[in-house]
Every structure is written in C-alpha cells, then in structure tokens.
Image: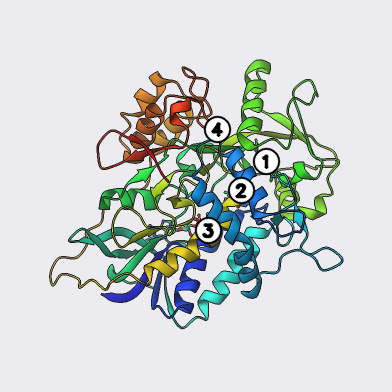
Amino acid sequence: MLHADVAVVGAGAAGLFAALVAAREGAQVVLVSRSPLAESASYWAQGGVAAAMTPGDSPARHMADTLAAGRGAARESAVRVLCEEAPARLAELTALGVSFDADRHGALALGLEGGHSARRVAHAGGSATGRRITRALSAAVAVDAGIEVLEGASASALWVHEGRCIGLLAEPVRRRSTQSTLATAVAVAARGTLLATGGAAALWERTTNPRGAIGAGLTLAHAAGADLADLELVQFHPTALVAEGDDDGFLITEAVRGEGALLLDAAGERFVDELAPRDEVALAIRERLHSQGTPSVSLHLRPVDMTRFPNVANALAAAGLDPRRDLIPVAPAAHYTMGGIASDLHGRSSLAGLYAVGECGCTGLHGANRLASNSLAECFVFGRRAAMAAGEEPRAAPPAAGRPQPGPSPVPSPHTRAALWRLAGLERSPDELRRLAHDPFGLARRIAGSALAREESRGAHQRSDATMPEPRLDGMHTVVRGEGAPVMEHWS
Ligand SMILES: Cc1cc2nc3c(=O)[nH]c(=O)nc-3n(C[C@H](O)[C@H](O)[C@H](O)COP(=O)(O)OP(=O)(O)OC[C@H]3O[C@@H](n4cnc5c(N)ncnc54)[C@H](O)[C@@H]3O)c2cc1C
C-alpha cells in the first residue's frame, strides 16, 4: 500500500496542475497516469486558455459572455470564480515555463473565438497550445520531489470506508505499448482523492476526442456513490474534419474562423455567423446537411494564414488536403461534456474526500454550452482550488482488512458508441432516448435518463418534441444520484 496526502488520477492539464499545486503546498502526492501524454484531451487543445488580460477587457465581460453561451443554465458563482481567477492562473503557467505567444511588442497575442466579445484567448505555439502546456507541466511534475508518478497505471476503483473516499486502487495497464511503474495492483491511501480523468465525448462514435475520453472517472465515482450531473449536456464541435479512417473527427479550431475562415454550404453560400457560439453553428450545419443531403459543409480556409495553425495544416496535409486549394469538408462531432461528477466551487464531490476537476467535474460552470477555451482555464482555476482543499482533508485510517476491489469496466462497446451517436446526437427524441435507456453500458443509460429528464431544448441539448427552453428549468442541473431517476436541482 502507498500513502499520500493527495492522490491525483489523470495527467492532463487538470491533474498535472493540481498535483503541482498540492506538492508546492507541502503535500505528498501520488499521481496515477494511465496513458502517454498524447492520449489526453489536453494535449490536443488547439485554441488556448481564456482569461481577461487586456485593459479593454474585464472578468465581468468574460462572465457576461460565459453566461450568455451557457444559455441560462450556467452556475453564476462558478462563472465568477473562473473569470476572476483565470488571469492569475495564466501568470502561474508562465512561471511554470509555458511560453504563451506574444506580439512583436512582447504583449500576449490574444486570439478571438466564437462567443467571446474580446480577444482573450492565450495560445502557445499557434495551435499547439495543449501540447506546449502539457509538456511544460509534465516536465515540472517529473522533477518535483513531492510527486510520485505511477505511470502506465489505471485507477480501477475508489476506496470507500465509513462513507468517505480514502484512496483508490491502481492497476498496471496491460497493453503492449505501455510500460507500467507497477508490477501488480496497489492500494493508495490518501486524505484527498482528486479525479482529473477527462471527459466522455469519445463515448460517441463520431468525436474529436482521443479514445480514452470515455468518462472513466464518472464510472468510478458513480460506483463509489458520488452524484453525477448534467450528463445530457454534450457539446458538438461544428468543424470536425470529415475523412476516411483515423483522420475523421480531427478538430479544426474555431480560431481559424476568428482569423477569417468561412463556412459554405453545398451551393457555395455562407449560411451562419461563423463566430456565433458552438451550439448555434453546429445546429446550422446540421440543418444544411439535412436539407442539402450532403455529409459535410465546407470550410474555406484560403483567407487564413495557416502558418499560424501548423498542426491543423499538418493534419490536413496528412489527409491529402491543401487549404490554399481545397475546400475542407467538415461536420459536427461530439466534443466536450459539460456534465460530469457533481462538484462544488472547490471541486468537492458529494462523497467526502473525493474531488473532481477538469472535464470530469461538473461545477455547472458551462451551463448548456461551453464557451470556447474556458475548459483549459477551468482545469487550472478549479484544479488549484481542489488541490488546496484536498490537502486539508483529515487523515483517515485505512481499515485493517479489506482492500478496494475493481469496479465496473469503464469501456463502452462499439455498439454503445454507435447508439449514443444515433440516439443521443445533436437532436434527441424521447423514443430514441428510451431505446438508449436500455443500453447495457451504465453511463449510456444514465445519459439517456438525464436527456429524458430535461424536457426542453437548451444549448447543446436539443429535443425534437420540446424545441424551446423551458423557463422553469433556468439555472437547473440534472442530478443522477445512485440508481434513482435523475432529479432537477438549483445550485447557488
Ligand atoms: C481536439 C480538442 C481541442 C480542444 N481545444 C481546446 C482549447 O483550445 N481550449 C480549451 O479550453 N479546451 C479545449 N479542448 C477541451 C480541453 O482540451 C479539455 O476539456 C481539457 O484538456 C480536459 O483536461 P483534463 O485534464 O480534465 O482531461 P484530459 O486532458 O483528457 O486528461 C485526462 C487524463 O486522465 C487519464 N485517465 C482517465 N481515466 C483514468 C484512470 N482510470 N486511471 C488513470 N488515468 C486515467 C487519461 O489517460 C488522461 O491522461 C479541446 C479538446 C479537444 C479534444
């Protein structure tokens, strides 16, 4: 058995940052990391980190944009925390070695993205932001004596004793390509256990996410008795590449639309404000795909200087596309899960001792539609808060006998992934959701139940039978507690 003050699961932006904060506060940290860097969503982030950094901008303005994008379902207290604290976290990242792009005067070069009323998206290496951030944070973690990293190890259960999470079970990943620090399963006892396991958008067949984004932390937390929330609120990114094989679903950042890229339908006409929030753009594309009977619309990249987006240019070249010559075929794909493990403003879940941050958590910050580039900011703002709080948890004595046992498998079958795309995609009908509610995979059933409970259309959740927002559901969150039917709750 290993002992720690704080056990962190996941080595994306949220987990790496939280581990560093906890260690710098004097905590002994064990970081359980399942996969190589390139398999975290953080690694693939292209746009950047949103923070109000210029005299013409302010946290209040960032708040107003975030609340507007959230379509009346964002939790105002969480939005305030994010917008007020993001600038300080950006400065900390710089101190940790992340070199954000600057203009020729040395000031931060801030990008404009859909739904933002000001240039406030800091990026690094153009569209290589996630890569640069995760590399810098990983390097800092590797040399921090307060952090023990269990690489190639997967958390397969949370350890619950007398109504409190007191750690987890870590197992070596048995994959030929993965080297593990562990030869065998090990229990990690900790005062605070912090899940930073990423989102669940790869549960959907067509996705922009790496394969591991299957909501593993949600499955662990639910099995341990923690509440989940807003599972029906899934953002579909409007511009994912339509291509054969592994290139399909590659995300083309909306920052290119901020720099002048246009969306054209089959007739070569513009049909939407390219800088509208994601839900609006995705629905407008879906309407064109249906009305024109095509599998994709076109992204016209010729006005854009693609040297500023090197990894997009490289991915398009790999798919045989030249943005100077070709129109790029794109269509929506599942991208970001606004829902997750219900958590307060310090990342605390409903289970004592258990925290959730980053995309696996749900503070209610994003409401029904995440504003672009708020999610990396969320990883750092709430990652720091949770790390501080987890280190303050009381030390619980592990029971003399009885170790945690592996819980249900978090891995969906191809059938489940296809069913989620077909039955809980951009537009949902009650009949289709009822069919999904019988899926063998627990998380798919809970997503269906939550989508059935939200009898309205709001942001990313569009119901064919209730096409407008329902005023009585303003500010309400769909909470899954145990095996009971979801309940709608207001969070202050
Ligand atoms: C293509 C793409 C582009 C994006 N662009 C942006 C952007 O520009 N700006 C922005 O703000 N957001 C962006 N996002 C969203 C953002 O990247 C994610 O929300 C954010 O990175 C999530 O970080 P995280 O640390 O919560 O999770 P992740 O980065 O996904 O990391 C989770 C980690 O947990 C590990 N893990 C999971 N389960 C276990 C387990 N049981 N045991 C051990 N380890 C486990 C995974 O292997 C992974 O390493 C983008 C997302 C994608 C997919």
- Tag on residue 115? 1
Please tell me whether residue 57 is drawn above or below residue 166 in the rendered image: above
**Amino acid at circle 3:** Cys
Crowdedness of circle 3 by 10 Å Cα count: few (<14), some, many (20+)?
many
3 horizontally vs 282: left or right:
left
Tell me how far mark 4 sits from mark 1, CA to CA. Answer: 13 Å
At x 83%, y 45%, the residue is 304
Place residue 136 in its image quadrant. Answer: bottom right
Image position of 198 with respect to 117: above or below: below
Residue found 40% across the figure and 74% down from its top:
29
Helix or strand or loop: what does disc 3 sit on? Answer: helix
Dot 1 or dot 2: first in sequence order is 2
Q: Amino acid at mark 2?
A: Met
| Badge 2 or badge 3: first in the primary sequence | 2
Q: Nearer the viewer, residue 398 or 439?
A: 398
Q: Which residue has dot 4 on it?
A: 459
Indicate the position of residue 356 as horizontal and vertical percent values.
Answer: 41, 56
**Do the residues bearing badges 4 and 1 touch, measured as CB atoms within 8 Å?**
no
Residue under the image location 36 percent in, 45 percent down: 228
SS at badge 2: helix
Residue 154: in sight, yes or no?
yes
Label disc, if present, on residue 228 of the rendered structure: none
Residue under label 3: 379
The amino acid marked with disc number 1 is: Gly
Mark carried by residue 63: 2
Q: Along the horizontal axis of the image, is 207 left or right of 440?
A: right
What separation in Å lies between label 3 and label 4 (alpha carbons)?
22 Å
User: Nearer the N terminus, badge 3 or badge 4?
Assistant: 3
Which label lies toward us, 1 or 3? 1
Residue at the far bottom in the pictured view: 145
Return the residue nearer the eye: 78 or 19: 78
Residue at mark 3: C-beta within 8 A of ligand 1:
yes
